[in-house]
Amino acid sequence: MKNLIRSLIIFGLSAFSCSKSENRSGLDMSNAVSSSSYASDNMAVQEEAMISDAVEVPKPLENNSKISENTEQKIIKTASVRFQVEDFKKSAEKLKRIAKDFGGINTSYNENNNGYNIEASFIVRITNSKFDTLLNALQTESIYLNYKNINAEDVTEEFIDIESRLKNKKAVEQKYLEILKKASRIDDILAVENQIRIIREEIEAKEGRLKYLKDRIAYSTINLTFYQNLENYQAPDISFWSKIKSSFSDGWSSIQNLGLWIVSIWPFVILVIIIFYFVKKKWKKK
C-alpha cells in the first residue's frame, strides 16, 4: 500500500510539472517509474531475504571419525549357505525347528525336486546378537558344505548422516510453519506452503530410509539352501493305454502334415494335370 501511495504522489507531481514543460514532464515521469521500480524490487529482495534466512541447508558432519568412535557401530549382516544333507525330510524339519528355537523368523520356503536331487531354500531373519550362533547350529545338519559366504556392511556413517540431516530438515520445516503463520498475502502463503511440501517429502524419504536401516541392523539375514542327491532315480513308467494314445496322436499329426504338404505343392499338381490332358488328347488323334 505504501508503494502504491508513493507511486501516486510521484505520478501527480510529474503530471503537474508536465503543464510547464514537455521535456521536464518526460524526465519526471522517467524518474517516477524508476523510483517505483526500485521500491518494488527492494521490497521483493527483502521478502526473499526473509525466506532465505529461514532455510538452513543441512551441513555434512565435520568429524565423522570422532562420532564413529563414540557411537555404537551399525552393522548389517547377511549370510548365504549351501550344503548337502543325508535325509532331506528329517533335515528340513530339524532346520526349521532350530531356526524357531533361536527366535528366527522364516520369511520364505521353496522346495524343488527334479528327480535327480531334492532341495529347498529358505530365508531366516535373526537378531544380530544370535546370528553367528544360529548359523553354526544350522550347519550341524551338513554332510558336505558347498559354500558359506558372510557379509558384514558397516552403515554407521550413513545412519548418523541421515539422522543429522533429518533433524535439520525438521528444523527448517518448523521455521517455514512459523513464517506461514505470519504470512498475509496469498502469493506468500502459496510459496511457503510449496516449500513446506518439498521439505515434508524429503523428511518422509529420509524417515523411510532410516526405518529400513534400523530393521536391517536389528535383524540379520541367512539365506540357506540344502539338498539331498537321489541315487536310485528311475524314469516314470508309461502305461500301455498311454502309449496307444500317444501313437494315435502321432498318426493324426502325420495325416495333417501330409495334407499340408499336398496343399503346399498345388501348383505342381495343376501342371501335371495339364500335361496329362494334352498328352491324352494327342494320343487319341493318333
Image (cartoon, rainbow, N blue to C red):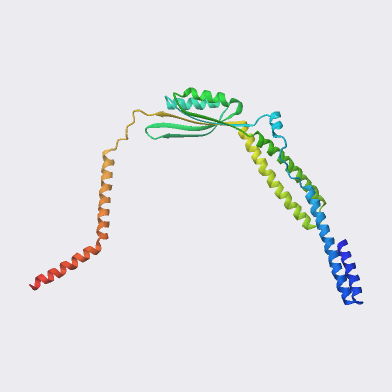
- Vertical placement of 48 versus 124: above or below? below
Q: Quadrant of the C terminus?
A: bottom left
Residue at the left extreme? 286
Observer-nearest of 108 and 182: 182
Q: Quadrant of the N terminus?
A: bottom right
Please state the horizontal and vertical placement of residue 226, each as a whole percent of the image.
Answer: 46, 29
The reply to whether residue 270 is in sight is: yes
Please state the horizontal and vertical placement of residue 31, each as a whole percent of the image.
Answer: 86, 67
- Vertical placement of 182 versus 150: above or below? below
Q: Quadrant of residue 113?
A: top left
Is 83 situated left or right of 39 in this image? left
Q: Quadrant of residue 263?
A: bottom left
Is 180 situated left or right of 154 in this image? right
Observer-nearest of 22 and 249: 22
Residue at 88%, 77% (x, y): give it.
Answer: 22
Is 163 situated left or right of 142 in this image? right
Please state the horizontal and vertical placement of residue 7, each as a whole percent of the image.
Answer: 87, 66
Residue at 26%, 43% (x, y): give it.
Answer: 244
Residue at 65%, 41% (x, y): give it.
Answer: 208
The reply to whether residue 180 is in sight is: no
Please state the horizontal and vertical placement of residue 163, each as a whole percent of the image.
Answer: 70, 38
Is 145 situated left or right of 208 in this image? left
Q: Quadrant of residue 259?
A: bottom left
